[in-house]
Amino acid sequence: MRRRLMLLLLVALGGLWLVSRFAPQVERIEVLGNVHYSASEIMALADIAPGDPLLWVNTWRLQRLVEDPWISRVRVIRHWPDTLSLKVWERTPAIVAGNTVMAIDGTVLPNVPEETKANLVVLSGWGPSRRDEALELVALLEEFAPEVISYSPGGFDVRHAKGWLYTPSIDLLKEHWGAFVSQQGGQVSVYPWGVSALP
């Protein structure tokens, strides 16, 4: 019985291979959403090329592309009979700490151009790492365009486009967010009891 099932399985797999092999082939490939990588680099990472059977291209086949740190998500779109679209969502550099560049989700991004690094938030500090909090701070302060974040066990000093900010923690800043936002420019310090501001 087991032998018969194995034989049927082999026949079925062989049939699927034949159907897919002689099914329509990829004649045109379009790459959408790419910024860091060129279309040809995406195709090389995906290991696809014109002439591949259209049915063979799926997210499992594209595992090397999916696992690349610059790539957040990939979607395969088939346009019958011969066109394949690869929609990619790339991570964006958010912060630089020394020679390390990270996306907002903490993923370390390699090979970031120097001109891109020059426009990123600069992170420095001492004591136990507060990297994850700093990344959350970058996202929270997006509208204020943070430029430099320095951390210590005591809190964060932030230079942003509209002034300076000190906060012991993300949670305290969130708690007093309304008071912080109401202060325009100058030096703003967040404390457990509230917010103080200097010109």
Image: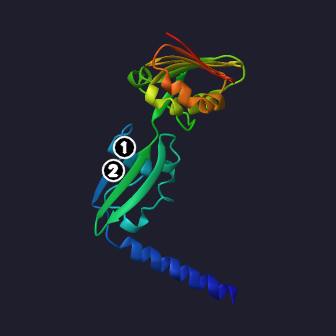
Q: For the residue carrying disc 2, how many other residues have a C-alpha within 10 Å: few (<14), some (14-19), or many (20+)?
A: some
Q: Are marks 2 and 1 in contact (CB under 8 Å)?
A: yes
Q: Going by the image, does 150 lie left or right of 185? A: right
Name the foreground residue: 101 vs 81: 101
- C-alpha distance separating marks 2 and 1: 7 Å
Q: Secondary structure at mark 1?
A: loop
Is residue 125 at all visible to an observer of this figure?
Answer: yes
Q: What kind of residue is marked 2? A: Val
Please give the name of the residue rendered at 39% of the width and 37% of the height, measured from the top-left corner. Answer: 36
Color style of the picture? rainbow
Please tell me which residue is depicted at 42% across the width and 52% down the height of the picture: 47
Q: Residue under circle 2?
A: 31
Across and down, in percent, residue 34 comes to 36, 43
> Where is the N terminus found, in terms of image quarters?
bottom right
Q: Give 169 or 199, whichever is nearer the viewer.
A: 199
**Residue that badge 1 annotates:** 34
Name which quarter of the figure residue 58 lies in. bottom left
Q: Is residue 188 above or below residue 71?
A: above
Q: Position of residue 50 (x, y in %)?
A: 31, 57
Tell me the residue at 42%/65% (across/down): 56
The disc labelled 1 sits on which kind of residue?
Answer: Asn
Question: Crowding at label 1, few (<14), some or many (≥20) Cα neighbours within 10 Å?
Answer: some
